């Protein structure tokens, strides 16, 4: 399945990213190769093959879950440039308008 330059540009625009023509070309080529590899894997007959989550016998070692005291909110907010009603105000990253 070929990924077009227009599809890469569209997704980049949705992600608020800007690519040069060369970068768009490279991403389209790379993404096409990735999709082609996945399609090849989908052609394999896996009927009767047991599900494997890991080929290595490994065990997660986790620490015990223990409650700890949190930070002092007033101290943390001393270095906050802008706050409102107990929240940190940050610049908006979404434009006003439609949801295309």
Image (tube, rainbow, N blue to C red):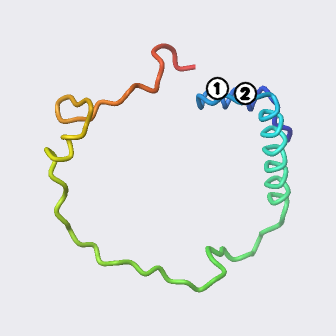
Q: Residue furthest top?
A: 97
Residue at x 23%, y 72% (from the top left corner): 66
Q: Nearer the viewer, residue 44 or 13?
A: 13
Residue at x 79%, y 48% (from the top left corner): 35
**Local crowd at mark 2 within 10 Å, few (<14), some, or many (≥20)?**
many
Residue at x 82%, y 39% (from the top left corner): 26
> Of helix, strand and loop, which one carries label 2?
helix
- Quadrant location of residue 49? bottom right
Tag 1–tag 2 contact (CB < 8 Å) = yes
Residue at x 20%, y 68% (from the top left corner): 67
In the image, taking residue 73 as reference, residue 99 lies left or right, namely: right
Q: Which residue is mark 1?
A: 13
State the image coordinates of residue 40 (x, y, percent, origin top left): 85, 57
In the image, taking residue 23 as reference, residue 67 lies left or right, namely: left
Image quarter in which the C terminus is found:
top right
State the image coordinates of residue 24 (x, y, percent, origin top left): 78, 33
In the image, taking residue 2 as reference, residue 73 lies left or right, namely: left
Image quarter in which the N terminus is found:
top right
In the image, taking residue 93 as reference, residue 23 lies left or right, namely: right
State the image coordinates of residue 6 (x, y, percent, origin top left): 78, 26
Number of the label disc, if any, that sits on residue 9: 2
Question: Is 34 located above or below residue 89 in the figure?
Answer: below
């Amino acid at each position: 399945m070929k990924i077009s330059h227009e599809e890469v540009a569209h997704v980049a625009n949705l992600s608020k990213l800007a690519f040069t023509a060369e970068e768009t070309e490279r991403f389209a080529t790379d993404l096409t190769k990735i999709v082609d590899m996945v399609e090849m894997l989908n052609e394999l007959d896996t009927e009767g093959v047991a599900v494997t989550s890991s080929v290595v016998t490994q065990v997660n070692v986790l620490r015990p879950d223990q409650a700890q005291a949190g930070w002092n909110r007033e101290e943390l907010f001393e270095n906050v440039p802008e706050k409102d009603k107990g929240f940190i105000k940050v610049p908006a990253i979404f434009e006003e308008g439609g949801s295309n």
